Image: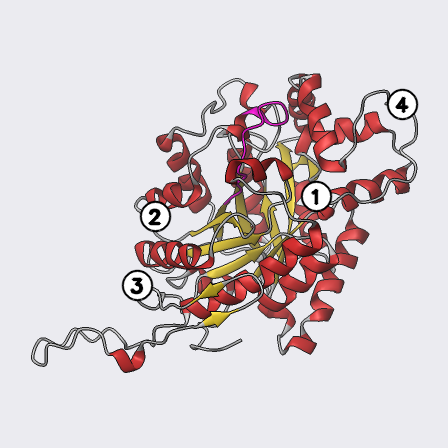
């Protein structure tokens, strides 16, 4: 029986912009013990993976607890030491990195974790990162051209070592067989990389590749290279359409639909009753400051709100050159539901443009099952509003219902993240 996949999205102290203000909530994403407790919650719930988002600039206006964080790969290496089964994924942007360093870092994490590493290969949508690297932020098309070549190079570097290249033969004195070690010698439009890496082949063959782009270019990159795709959607029909659009690209690329798992992002607000859940959401919303949501609205839609009537219908608005996935989801919802800027503002205040699912545990489980069984998702990227409470509600109340229905695992099987995701271990040189 097909079962859903669940990821835990770590975003600061929670995905709600003011979740850190909830009584008893974690207030620092620099506290490794608190983060280890988050990982333990997810592993207790048999989640497939932990995923840490990232950006490369400090902006306390939009999501203050997201501004302060540990560097993702350093943090995940620490989590590898206190977890046994769960996958460990992180964002590293292709626009402001180099392929050799990224390939080496994730290969290292895969060895440290025993085969549980995953790389979220994103372009980085915000121009605010550029000055931190002394660069101009490339436009959307150029960012994706860079990303496509970047991922190609990283995969090539991961394949530079044959399975048995590390010999360590005491009698002959041969440590590495040079005949089983291969230079990449890549010369492309954006990168020149010789290789090979100075680390052996990954326990998974190659670390898992995650992708989160929602534009046509993002979907094309995901269809060619991703094992897991994080979707930004607000409605079931929209999710089903996007799911089909991605899956339909795969056969022409020699890939089967089951080789790519699509996980929409969802912020579950869960109660033992619907009233309890609604009260929790109202409490969270009461903590939002005008500065938080207003800055998010400007960032997501790429508009200057000065002089705009917040209570007028949104009307036509073109996609800007930042994150197309978030902007498209919000603009589509605004047109469908005749939303104003203030309506979008309030929506962003809850989950930054992601889907908010509020209700009793049975209601939440019913909705997730409906999406899973009707062509809208292969699972979900769960985005707790705050820790530990938001995650605890989902693990303790919703996961057992999914397990009783046979929709989710009750224990871990296999040793690598690829095992959890039902993915084959790729052979060297396999596309």
* Label whose residue precedes the other's in the sequence (1 or 3): 3
* Point 59% across, 31% down: residue: 385
Label 4's element? loop
Question: Which element type, helix, strand or loop, lies under badge 2?
Answer: helix
Q: Nearer the viewer's eye, disc 4 or disc 3? A: 3
Question: How crowded is the residue under tag 2: few (<14 C-alpha within 10 Å), some, or many (20+)?
Answer: many
Gap between marks 4 and 2 measured at Cα: 48 Å
- Magenta stretch holds residue 394: no
Q: Identify which residue is drawn at 51% across, 40% down.
A: 133
In the rendered image, which quarter contains the N terminus?
Answer: bottom right
Asked if one can make out residue 132 in the rendered structure from this viewpoint, the answer is: yes
Q: Closer to us: mark 4 or mark 1?
A: 1
What residue sits right under mark 3 in the picture? Answer: 198
| Magenta residue span | 52-64
Question: Is residue 118 rendered to the left or right of residue 264?
Answer: left
**Magenta segment main secondary structure:** loop
Q: Are marks 4 and 3 in contact (CB under 8 Å)?
A: no
Q: Which residue is mark 4?
A: 311
Q: Is residue 152 above or below residue 38?
A: below
Q: Please give the residue where the numbered disc 2 appears in the rendered image.
A: 80
């Amino acid at each position: 029986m097909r079962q859903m996949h669940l990821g835990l999205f770590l975003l600061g102290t929670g995905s709600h912009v003011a979740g850190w203000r909830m009584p008893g909530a974690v207030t620092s994403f620099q506290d490794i013990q608190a983060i280890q407790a988050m990982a333990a919650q997810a592993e207790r719930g048999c989640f497939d993976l932990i995923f840490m988002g990232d950006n490369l600039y400090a902006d306390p206006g939009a999501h203050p607890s997201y501004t302060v964080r540990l560097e993702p790969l350093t943090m995940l290496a620490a989590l590898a030491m206190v977890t046994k089964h769960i996958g460990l994924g992180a964002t590293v942007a292709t626009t402001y990195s180099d392929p050799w360093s990224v390939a080496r870092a994730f290969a290292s994490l895969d060895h440290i974790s025993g085969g549980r590493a995953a790389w979220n290969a994103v372009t980085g949508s915000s121009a605010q990162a550029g000055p931190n690297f002394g660069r101009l932020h490339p436009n959307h098309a150029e960012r994706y051209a860079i990303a496509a070549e970047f991922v190609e190079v990283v995969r090539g570097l991961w394949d530079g070592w044959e399975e048995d290249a590390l010999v360590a033969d005491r009698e002959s004195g041969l440590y590495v067989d040079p005949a089983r070690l291969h230079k990449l010698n890549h010369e492309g439009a954006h990168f020149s990389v010789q290789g090979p890496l100075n680390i052996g082949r990954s326990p998974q063959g190659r670390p898992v590749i995650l992708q989160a782009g929602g534009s046509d270019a993002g979907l094309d990159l995901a269809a060619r290279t991703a094992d897991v795709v994080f979707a930004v959607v607000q409605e079931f029909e929209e999710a089903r359409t996007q799911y089909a659009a991605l899956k339909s690209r795969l056969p022409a690329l020699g890939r089967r639909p089951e080789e790519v798992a699509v996980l929409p992002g969802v912020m579950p607000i869960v109660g033992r009753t619907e009233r309890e859940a609604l009260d929790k959401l109202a409490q969270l919303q009461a903590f939002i400051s005008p500065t938080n949501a207003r800055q998010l609205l400007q960032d997501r839609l790429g508009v200057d709100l000065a002089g705009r009537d917040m209570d007028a219908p949104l009307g036509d608005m073109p996609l800007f050159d930042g994150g197309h996935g978030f902007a498209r989801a919000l603009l589509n919802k605004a047109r469908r539901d005749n939303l104003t800027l203030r309506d979008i503002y309030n929506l962003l205040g809850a989950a930054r443009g992601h889907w908010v699912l509020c209700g009793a545990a049975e209601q939440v489980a019913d909705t997730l099952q409906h999406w899973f069984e009707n062509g809208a998702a292969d699972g979900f990227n769960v985005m707790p509003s705050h820790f530990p409470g938001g995650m605890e509600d989902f693990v303790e109340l919703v996961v057992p219902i999914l397990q009783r229905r046979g929709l989710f695992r009750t224990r871990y099987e296999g040793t690598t993240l690829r095992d959890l995701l039902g993915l084959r271990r790729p052979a060297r040189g396999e596309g």
